[in-house]
């Protein structure tokens, strides 16, 4: 794509460089021709990217970085017009860690005097001559040094690492001996990637071979200094010929606590998910759960990155609250009136015989929050665009694969915005997370789809569909009518019939998004009777400006609404929903003093992880699941 000459020309003319001074008429003609040449080049790029992810290879290269830098300049000049395939490529490239770092560096430089040509090459230069390299052990030029090479970086080097001497540290995933102990093969993993690296130890030439043989096997921690060599084995490019091995921590799994693997819970064999949940302190060592946790990290990072790039302010909302945001009443009480050995007779009561919470720590009944939304709205009405990302709690006695008592919520709030703005933001966010997972979590996605026995076939295609598709939109009323029509025509049978006025069940949501539209779908304008008091009442007085985003595999992923900005309507709706005015006086003040139209949404973070991994049970995407009857660890 030959954009360099017209782009440099436009940048030079914008900067007023004397070599490009010309009459107004000439300047206009030159500018028009330059923009036409750029448009033609962008069309060529769109056609090229229609059938591939990156410009030159299957992974991001300098071609992508330099072209991305050029497109960034075109965007600043207001002449960037990307098609759908090019937009996907642009978003994917922008999500790469080194490109993101380059963008941050360029932003810092924007306050200084920088020439046009240096702006054009800033991103490529900051990328350090290519993406995906191993880098050094010292991070960011600071003092901290791992003292080892992470297995992820080692494997990324591939054949280029052959001949190097490296130090690796990690845990034994598998171990076997050959030739009566003369040679030992160990698969070592350090958690940086789902893949391990093979260590080859020779009793004749490797210091510490016998110690490794006697370390207890699977689960022991080792340090190895080794030479990287080409691997003759199928499925791996390199392996490590170990010169010196040190057992850091043996496995004390013998019957009497001696070294041995007999009683090690995570010994090499297939483990059921329920067993792994019972071993929550050790299950991060399993392939499935370590991949899930890396995906969780990636989605958390992508979330903060997404909102930070758009100027949102991250706001911490309280976990202890005196308000029930959803009006559901399913909340965990926080009290100091029940010390460990309290007797019933010692609990203070009022004249009516009820617990006297005025004697409690906060002087009133308080609970763990079910949402940070009401609190974060107060900051939105001052800082305009904010979000909160933190733990929430619900005392719902549910044992399904979709519910937890403790879970994390992402809740952005935008001011001077309506439901349309809210839907656009939510759609952008979901698409961004899917693109980020595809670009930055390739190994873990490949594991979940290709190697994990219960994995979802077509996982990556489903995520690509999210990135590349426009979300469908339908009203609640249209959705109910559609479901009823499908039933009448004999196309589907549901456990519960969808009546207007009832909340859609998971079976209804998944049918709409998986069978009808076959892509993410936004359902809007729900009956007011099934939604919270703070959602804006529509003109029909029967529905509210609410929306749910339904996605294949999950059903509802996001729920949001435009908030009621009329004080009188808010007070009326709150009273109708049984919310006491004294409990939301501060929330009502936002409408009393400088009210503005605003909107927001909530996303259950664990459901997002299920969405990008294909895992079926929400208990397998959070480190320590809290469910009825279970609060171990």
Image (tube, grey):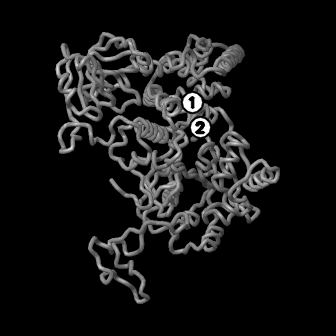
Of the two numbered discs 2 and 1 on the same chain, state the one appearing first in sequence: 1
Q: Secondary structure at mark 1?
A: helix
Q: Is disc 2 in contact with disc 1, using a CB cutoff of under 8 Å?
A: yes
Q: Is residue 380 visible?
A: yes
Judge whether 484 appears above or below 116 on screen.
below
- Residue 573 disc label: none
Query: Which image quarter: residue 32?
Result: top right
Residue drawn at point x = 38 percent, y = 68 percent: 334
Nearer the observer, 600 or 265:
265
Q: Position of residue 33 (x, y in %)?
A: 70, 14
Nearer the observer, 255 or 227:
255
Q: Secondary structure at mark 2?
A: helix
Residue drawn at point x = 62 percent, y = 12 percent: 2
Task: State left or right for residue 342 relative to residue 413.
Answer: left
The quarter of the rendered structure image containing the N terminus is top right
Residue drawn at point x = 26 percent, y = 39 percent: 262
Q: CA distance from mark 2 to mark 1?
A: 9 Å
Residue tagged 1: 91
Q: Is residue 110 visible?
A: no
Nearer the observer, 162 or 307:
162
Task: State left or right for residue 183 relative to residue 7.
Answer: left
- Residue 431 disc label: 2
Query: Which image quarter: residue 393?
Result: bottom left
Q: Position of residue 506 (x, y in %)?
A: 63, 53
Query: Which image quarter: residue 463?
Result: top right
């Amino acid at each position: 794509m030959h954009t360099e000459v017209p782009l440099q020309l436009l940048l030079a003319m914008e900067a007023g460089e004397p070599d490009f001074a010309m009459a107004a008429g000439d300047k206009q003609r030159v500018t028009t021709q330059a923009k036409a040449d750029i448009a033609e080049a962008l069309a060529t790029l769109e056609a090229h990217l229609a059938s591939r992810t990156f410009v030159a290879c299957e992974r991001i290269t300098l071609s992508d970085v330099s072209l991305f830098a050029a497109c960034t300049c075109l965007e600043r000049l207001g002449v960037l017009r990307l098609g759908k395939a090019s937009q996907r490529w642009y978003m994917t490239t922008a999500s790469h860690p080194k490109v993101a770092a380059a963008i941050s560096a360029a932003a810092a430089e924007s306050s200084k005097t920088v020439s046009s040509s240096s702006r054009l090459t800033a991103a490529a230069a900051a990328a350090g001559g290519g993406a995906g390299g191993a880098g050094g052990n010292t991070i960011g030029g600071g003092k901290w040094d791992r003292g080892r090479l992470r297995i992820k970086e080692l494997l990324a080097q591939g054949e280029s690492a052959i001949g190097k001497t490296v130090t690796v540290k990690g845990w034994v995933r598998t171990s076997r001996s050959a030739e009566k102990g003369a040679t030992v093969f160990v698969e070592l993993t350090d958690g940086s990637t789902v893949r391990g690296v093979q260590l080859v130890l020779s009793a004749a030439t490797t210091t510490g071979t016998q110690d490794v043989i006697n370390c207890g096997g699977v689960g022991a921690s080792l340090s190895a200094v080794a030479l990287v060599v080409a691997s003759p084995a199928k499925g791996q490019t390199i392996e490590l010929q170990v010169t010196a091995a040190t057992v850091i921590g043996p496995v004390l799994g013998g019957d009497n606590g001696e070294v041995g693997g007999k009683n090690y819970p995570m010994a090499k064999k297939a483990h059921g998910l329920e067993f792994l949940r019972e071993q929550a302190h050790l299950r991060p060592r399993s392939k499935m759960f370590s991949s899930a946790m890396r995906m969780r990290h990636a989605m958390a990072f992508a979330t903060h990155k997404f909102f930070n790039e758009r100027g949102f302010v991250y706001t911490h909302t309280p976990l202890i609250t005196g308000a029930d945001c959803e009006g559901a009443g399913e909340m965990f009480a926080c009290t100091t009136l029940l010390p460990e050995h309290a007797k019933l007779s010692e609990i203070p009561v009022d004249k009516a015989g009820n617990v006297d919470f005025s004697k409690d720590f906060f002087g009133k009944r308080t609970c763990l929050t079910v949402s940070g939304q009401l609190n974060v709205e107060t900051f939105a009405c001052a800082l305009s665009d904010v979000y909160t990302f933190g733990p929430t709690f619900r005392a719902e006695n549910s044992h399904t694969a979709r519910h937890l008592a403790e879970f994390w919520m992402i809740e952005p709030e935008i001011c001077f915005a309506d439901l349309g703005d809210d839907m656009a933001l939510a759609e952008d966010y979901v698409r961004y997370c899917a693109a980020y997972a595809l670009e930055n979590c390739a190994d873990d996605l490949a594991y979940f789809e290709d190697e994990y026995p219960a994995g979802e076939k077509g996982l990556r295609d489903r995520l690509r569909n999210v990135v590349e598709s426009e979300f469908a939109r339908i009203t609640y009323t249209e959705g109910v009518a559609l479901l009823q029509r499908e039933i009448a025509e004999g196309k589907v049978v549901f456990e519960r019939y969808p009546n207007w006025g009832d909340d859609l069940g998971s079976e209804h949501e998944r049918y709409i998004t998986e069978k009808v539209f076959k892509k993410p779908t936004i359902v809007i304008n729900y009956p007011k009777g099934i939604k919270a008091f703070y959602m804006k009442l529509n003109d029909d007085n029967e529905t509210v400006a609410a929306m749910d985003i339904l996605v294949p595999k999950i059903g509802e992923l996001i729920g949001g609404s435009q908030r009621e900005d009329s004080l009188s309507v808010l007070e009326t709706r709150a009273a109708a929903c049984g919310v006491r005015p004294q409990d939301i006086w501060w929330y009502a003040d936002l409408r009393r003093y400088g009210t503005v139209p605003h909107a927001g949404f909530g996303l259950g973070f664990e459901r997002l992880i299920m969405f990008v991994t294909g895992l079926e049970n929400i208990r397998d995407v959070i480190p320590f699941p809290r469910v009825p009857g279970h609060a171990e660890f």
